[in-house]
Amino acid sequence: MYARWKGWDVAGLTREYLGDLEVKDGDRVLEVAVGTGRHLPFLPRTAHFFGLDISWGMLRRCQRNVAKWGREAALFLGAAERLPFRDQSFDAVLDLGAINFINDRAAAIHEMIRVAKPGARFAFADAREEFVKRYEWLPGARYLLGDFMVPMNPPVDLLPPGMQEVRVKDILGGMAYCLVFRKPR
């Protein structure tokens, strides 16, 4: 688990944007691109956690972490553009650190909204282009700065009409963003 990185209070920041999800006892929470599961310890133990990732390797690491933390999680292999869940299944949906890299962001956002219950909260956080340029030495950054630069702006324009409480917050000194919103009831 991390607490600080390059002088930033990453743990505090994580608590802040996960707090925007307003997760309550018994809520069903889906994290798309769950990776190692590093956000799970910041959610209430009484929430039901579901994680999806495109990588078996990440899901195995997540499974080990979940066991180490004494938590429970249902983990699924799959792509964000085709979520293997029923309509209106989740009270909160998050994607922290992957939305920039999903092949079809519009389809993925549509899917995340589809599987969310009316009134569900969302949080999408990711780096801005300036972050990648500043930290070229990070694994994969040189690839991102080449001819294959992906969009690194909050995908507000990809939200369907009618989403509520849409806010974009700058995080990490403006090097990243967090887009939060609510599905209409």
Image: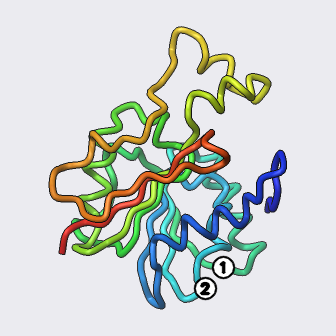
**In the picture, which quadrant includes the C terminus?**
bottom left
**x 41%, y 59%: residue:** 180
Considering the numbered disc 2 on the image, is that residue within a helix, a strand or a loop?
Answer: loop
**x 60%, y 85%: residue:** 45
21 or 170: nearer the eye? 170
Q: Is residue 156 left or right of 44 when viewed as pictured?
A: left
Q: Amino acid at mark 1?
A: Arg
Q: Measured from the top left, where is residue 28 in percent x and y?
A: 41, 77
Residue 114 falls in image quadrant: bottom left
Asked if 138 appears above or below 43 in the picture, the reply is above
Asked if 169 appears above or below 134 in the picture, the reply is below
Q: Amino acid at mark 2?
A: Arg
Residue 103 falls in image quadrant: top left
Considering the numbered disc 1 on the image, is that residue within a helix, a strand or a loop?
Answer: loop
Mark 1–mark 2 Cα distance, whole angstroms, equals 7 Å
Q: Pointers 1 and 2 in contact (CB under 8 A)?
A: yes
37 or 76: nearer the eye? 37
Q: Measured from the top left, where is residue 81 in percent x and y?
A: 33, 43
Q: Which mark is residue 45?
A: 2
Q: Is residue 23 left or right of 39 when viewed as pictured?
A: left
**In the picture, which quadrant includes the N terminus?**
bottom right
Q: Measured from the top left, where is residue 79 in percent x and y?
A: 41, 44
Q: Is residue 104 left or right of 17 when viewed as pictured?
A: left
| Residue placed furthest toward the top | 147
